[in-house]
Amino acid sequence: MLKCLLTKEDKIHVAHCLDLDLIAEGDTKEESLTNIKLAIEDYLSFVAENKLEQELIPRFAPLKYWKQYFESVKKPLIEDYRRNHSLPQIESVERVVYG
């Protein structure tokens, strides 16, 4: 599964495929997603036609975009976990092993 970061810069929606370092824009979130899908299809077709898989897949985006992606997915995951799980109750500790 390819990971995409969606952002909004001024009035433009930006979709950034982090695994291939491709960017597409649109006036709406949906348009930017449609455009990134087309960009990915075109890129993968070009790579396959020219037998460049070894050189161009993957082609990762810079680290700052990955950090932004993981920060954006981390918050809802933590909130969901907290909503659905309580802290375990510790009744006793029988043995502690240090490695």
Image (spheres, rainbow, N blue to C red):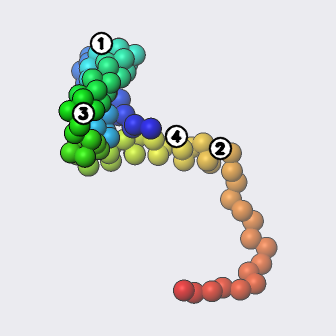
Name the residue carrying label 4.
Answer: 76
Q: Quadrant of the N terminus?
A: top left
The reply, left or right, for residue 68 in relation to residue 85 is left
Relative height, residue 85 to residue 30 (above, below): below
Residue indicated by mark 3? 47
Q: Nearer the viewer, mark 4 or mark 3?
A: 3
Question: Which three-letter amino acid code belongs to the residue tagged 2?
Answer: Arg
Q: Are marks 4 and 2 in contact (CB under 8 Å)?
A: no
Q: Secondary structure at mark 2?
A: helix
Q: Nearer the viewer, mark 3 or mark 1?
A: 3
| Residue 43 visible to the viewer | no
Image-based side of 41 in relation to 76, left or right: left
Residue type at tag 4: Pro
Question: Which amino acid type is shown beneath numbered disc 1?
Answer: Asp
Question: Residue 65: where, in percent of width, then height?
Answer: 28, 42
Sequence order check: which comes first, mark 3 or mark 2?
A: 3
Which residue in the protein does label 1 denote?
27
Other-residue count near label 4 (Cα within 10 Å), few / some / many at <14 / 14–19 / ≥20: few
Above or below, 88 against 57 in this view is below
Residue indicated by mark 2: 83
Alpha-carbon span between mark 4 and mark 3: 35 Å
Quarter of the figure with the C terminus: bottom right
Residue 74 drawn at (x, y percent): 47, 46
Report which quarter residue 30 is drawn in: top left
> Whole-Å distance between the Cαs marked 3 and 1?
28 Å
Residue reaching furthest to the right:
91
Q: Are marks 3 and 1 in contact (CB under 8 Å)?
A: no
**Secondary-structure class at tag 1:** loop
